């Protein structure tokens, strides 16, 4: 499923392609035909993105709400196909196209319905003005591990499995750390890092999370080869040596998603007042 940086990038692409000009709207597949007829000839006045939700605003005609889900895709200026849920045509020269295929959601909604979607989502690191304290308030009340909380869109919007794994690694955080053990300083560091990483993801249209000293050229290693692209520390690197400490990267299912982490760089959390086994065995203790 695309992560939030992809949705924010699509919002910008749609705005640049169609903003301020009437569009022709159609549904070659037929499942959005009635709503497309209401949009045909309308002007794209605004775009918005919140987490993994994309909104295209057409004034009095309403908002097109899109959630790509697991298989949905948006393509600009591609070949004509009859599998398209929504096609927009127009732009400055009238020849730009935007095709939406296979979304989990594609619906024409009102402003109050749009607001209801925002209300049920957590803060998004890519939305200016979103308050990270809203997420911390929910995290700090939870006994759940931090890893699944980061991917709960009601807690934090836009973060998926890649950013989740990578930001926890970059800060040496045990993914099984209970939410209620996350202190404000740690949360702010995680949030600020996500803001930087995800903004770069929007600009580059890919996820890169390794620091300069761990890039392929600096380490004399081959670049990563993966459908997701980008240089990462632990995501989908199961069994490979950690780029920092050499410990094999581990994975296990957690809340129906594969969790990736380095046991060396992200040691298990020890609750306050409880000595670790290693400390208990240490001489002179």
Image (cartoon, grey):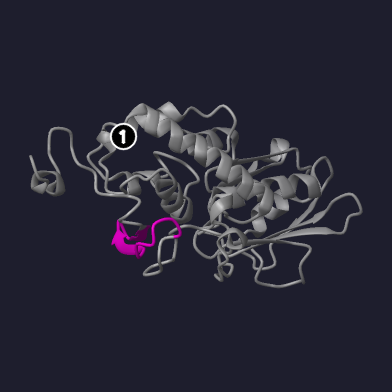
Left or right placement of residue 17 versus residue 8 in this view: right
Does residue 139 show up magenta in the picture?
A: no
Q: Residue 73 location, x and y as percent?
A: 61, 62
Q: Classify mark 1: helix, strand or loop.
A: loop
Quarter of the rendering containing residue 80: bottom right
Q: Nearer the viewer, residue 200 or 76?
A: 200
Q: Nearer the viewer, residue 47 or 122?
A: 122
State the residue at coordinates (25%, 37%). 142
Q: Residue 76 location, x and y as percent?
A: 75, 60
Q: Which residue is mark 1?
A: 182
Q: Residue 41 location, x and y as percent?
A: 81, 48
State the residue at coordinates (34%, 62%). 247
Mark 1 nearby-residue class (10 Å; few <14, some 14–19, many ≥20):
some
Does residue 249 show up magenta in the picture?
A: yes
| Residue 107 seen | no
State the residue at coordinates (57%, 45%). 198
Q: Quadrant of the C terminus?
A: top left
| Residue 98 seen | yes
Left or right placement of residue 256 versus residue 120 in this view: left
Q: What range is drawn magenta here?
A: 243-260
Q: Residue 187 location, x and y as percent?
A: 39, 33
- Name the residue furthest right: 93
Q: How many marks?
A: 1
Q: Nearer the viewer, residue 203 or 26?
A: 203
Left or right placement of residue 243 versus residue 90 in this view: left
Rendered position, 116 above or below 245: above
State the residue at coordinates (53%, 55%). 214
Rendered position, 85 above or below 180: below
């Amino acid at each position: 499923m695309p992560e939030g940086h992809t949705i924010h990038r699509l919002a910008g692409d749609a705005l640049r392609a169609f903003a301020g000009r009437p569009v022709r709207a159609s549904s070659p597949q037929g499942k959005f035909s009635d709503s497309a007829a209401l949009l045909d000839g309308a002007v794209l006045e605004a775009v918005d993105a919140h987490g993994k939700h994309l909104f295209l605003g057409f004034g009095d005609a309403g908002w097109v709400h899109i959630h790509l889900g697991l298989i949905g895709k948006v393509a600009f200026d591609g070949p004509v196909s009859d599998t398209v849920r929504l096609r927009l045509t127009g732009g400055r020269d009238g020849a730009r196209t935007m095709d939406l295929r296979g979304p989990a959601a594609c619906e024409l909604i009102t402003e109050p319905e749009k607001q209801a979607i925002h209300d049920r989502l957590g803060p998004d690191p890519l939305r200016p003005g979103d308050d990270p304290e809203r997420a911390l308030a929910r995290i700090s009340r939870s006994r759940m591990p931090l890893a699944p909380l980061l991917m709960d869109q009601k807690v934090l919007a836009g973060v998926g499995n890649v950013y989740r794994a990578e930001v926890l690694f970059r800060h040496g955080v045990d993914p099984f750390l209970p939410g209620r053990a996350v202190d404000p300083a740690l949360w702010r560091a995680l949030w600020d890092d996500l803001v930087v990483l995800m903004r770069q993801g929007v600009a580059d249209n890919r996820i890169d999370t390794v620091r300069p000293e761990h890039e392929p050229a600096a380490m004399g290693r081959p670049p990563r080869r993966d459908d997701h692209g980008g240089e990462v520390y632990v995501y989908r690197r199961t069994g490979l040596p950690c780029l920092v400490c050499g410990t094999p990267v581990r994975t296990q299912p957690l809340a129906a998603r594969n969790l990736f982490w380095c046991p060396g760089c992200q040691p298990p959390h020890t609750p306050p007042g409880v000595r670790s086994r290693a400390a208990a065995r240490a001489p002179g203790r």
